[in-house]
Amino acid sequence: MTLTLPSPASPLKIGTRGSPLALAQAYETRTRLMAAFDLPEAAFEVVVIKTTGDNRAMIDADRPLKEIGNKGLFTKEIEEAMLAGDIDIAVHSSKDMPVEQPQGLILDAFLPREDVRDAFVSPKFAAIADLPEGAVVGTSSLRRRAQLLNKRADLKVVEFRGNVQTRLKKLADGVASCTFLAQAGLNRLAMDNVPATPVEVDDMLPAIAQGAIGIERRQNDSRAAELLEAIHHQETAQRLAAERALLAGLDGSCETPIAGLAVIDGGTLSLRGQVLRPDGSEAIDATLSGDLSDAAALGAAMAQDLLNRAVKGFFDWH
């Protein structure tokens, strides 16, 4: 069957959140599709959809996301629009995606992964080690909070949300001495002017799937599947298969401090994982390597190992 390409008269509708980073990711997807099929920009329509997470994050800016509700916070309305046929594909930050998609949808296309590291952002200090005792750190990430307190129990961590510009203003206003952002986001927004220093993964293991753009579609949409196959990056998919299997095995969400990173060397995949008590008082680390074809099985095996080593109540929020 001949592939029917998008056209200005019948554009492919790309769903996304409206943040500057979300739009940058949607535009990157569009650019890659344009290049793959030699299509004009007008053959695509970027459709901005406001999610529950966007609305609640603005209203409840000082409340932890775990109190608002996490699973699907930034995806639900976009997925509903796709199921209704209002959009054809949806572009997401993979680290925001629940491990299971709604019935009828599938997440099986990924763009080449960006920098996986966290970035330490501060107008005053160059690194975590430079922070004075009792310094205030702003972050909304339970993972980053737990990792920081595990290394530096003296730090005070406060809720810190908003886009990059909002967080930088909070830093300038003295609300906190530093914050953290994904280095991938800064790179995609070309924000070289931000006072940021990448944190090596040995010092702060990143979130599952950090730095990867995932593209979701309807499961029965063979046209979208064929279009996305042309821009799909297999190595990123293999790495995320291991990481997302680890997350699934731990029943992970934004409510649980979980970190993980898979790397590939030839035919071998190596996976590192970490779970932490929410207050940072304890961390459990694991490493596992195996054949690349067993990526998902490696993630599942690591999840079981970590669960076996975590005592009852390990993940309870205090």
Image (cartoon, grey):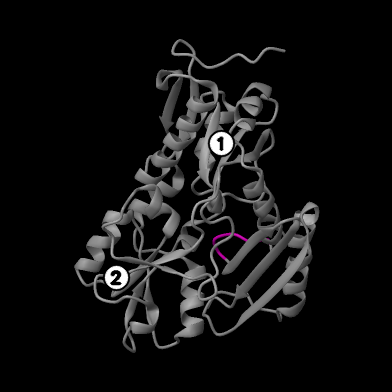
Residue placed under numbered mark 1 in the picture: 79
- Taking the spot 29% from the left edge, 70% from the top edge, the residue there is 122
Question: Which residue is found at the position 65% from the left and 53% from the top?
Answer: 240
As displayed, is residue 61 above or below residue 154?
A: above
Under mark 2, the amino acid is Ser
Percent coordinates x, y for residue 134 in the rendering: 33, 87
Q: Residue at x 56, y 23 (%)?
A: 85
Q: Which mark is residue 218?
A: none
Residue 275: x percent and y percent? 62, 73
* Mark 1, secondary structure of its residue: helix
Q: Which residues are magenta?
A: 251-255
Q: Residue at x 69, y 52 (%)?
A: 241
Residue 145 locus on image (x, y percent): 46, 73
**Which residue position is annotated with label 2?**
122
Q: Quadrant of residue 107?
A: top right
**Magenta stretch: helix, strand or loop mostly:** loop
Q: How many marks?
A: 2
Is residue 105 shown left or right of residue 151?
right
Image-based side of 93 in relation to 137, left or right: right
Q: Please determine whether, in this image, residue 314 is positioned above or below residue 171.
A: below
